[in-house]
Image (spheres, rainbow, N blue to C red):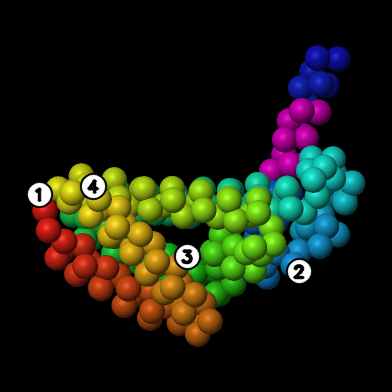
Amino acid sequence: MAASTSHDRSSDADTRRRIIRAMAALLQQQGYESASIKRIATTAQASPSSVYHFFPGGKEELAVEAMRHGAGEFGKLLAQGLASSADPAAATAACALLLADDLKQSQWSDGCPVAVTALETIGRVPGLQEAATEALTAWRDLVAAKLTGSGIAPDAARSLAGTVISMLEGAELLSRVTADDTPLRDAAVHLAQLVDAAPRT
């Protein structure tokens, strides 16, 4: 009986993860409004009742979890880029290049779920706006820590890190719309120059 219970819990956790990932993918590709419960369930290979079982608050509750999942994935990409070089300019450029490779590999379909969803629902779905703010703050803080470690004063590093995230988000949007990674590769060059020029303490 104990073994069966353990298996059920594992199966439930797997189903919940699939639903979150399915929603995250739909947010990336098509946005919040077009992601119906039926479509989410089909993508996750689950039943609509399973979606409501794990997320009784419905699509909004699920979207918040999916946005946090997507934010975590983007955070991992940022962390990978930032860890790629001791030189903060090269590391920041690497973030843009990794994003370009990732977007190109998805054939321009996997945009940032945070930006897409936040813009689509701003002022209408407070939970998603809060989750987006959390994500953007966490990404900025990741970059700021790298910049501070290179001798840039904390306030300046935080401000510059916000600019880095803004440029990455904007360049990703341009690359996705044009199906061309040039904006992100250009951003890599200019981000490196920007970080290089920042005064050190």
- In the rendered structure, which disc, 2 or 4, sits on the residue that comes first in sequence? 2
Q: Is residue 85 left or right of residue 169?
A: left
Residue that badge 4 annotates: 154
Q: Which residue is mark 3?
A: 102
Where does the N terminus fall, quadrant-wise?
A: top right
Identify the residue under disc 1.
Answer: 201
- Amino acid type, mark 1: Thr
Q: Is residue 11 magenta?
A: yes
* Residue situated in front as seen by the camera: 62 or 18: 62
Mark 4 or mark 1: name the one nearer the start of the chain: 4
Image coordinates of residue 176 in percent, x first then y, are 52, 77
Mark 4 Cα-neighbour bin, 10 Å: few <14, some 14–19, many ≥20: some
Q: Earlier in the sequence, mark 1 or mark 3?
A: 3
- Which percent across, then down, holds residue 178? 50, 85
User: Which label sits in the foreground, 1 or 3?
Assistant: 1
Viewer-side label of 4, 3: 4
Give the Cα separation between the discs numbered 3 and 2.
23 Å
Examine the rendered structure and indicate whether residue 44 appears above or below residue 196.
above
Q: Residues within 10 Å of mark 2 (few under 14, many from 20)?
A: few
At 36% across and 66% down in the image, what residue appears? 96
SS label for mark 3: helix
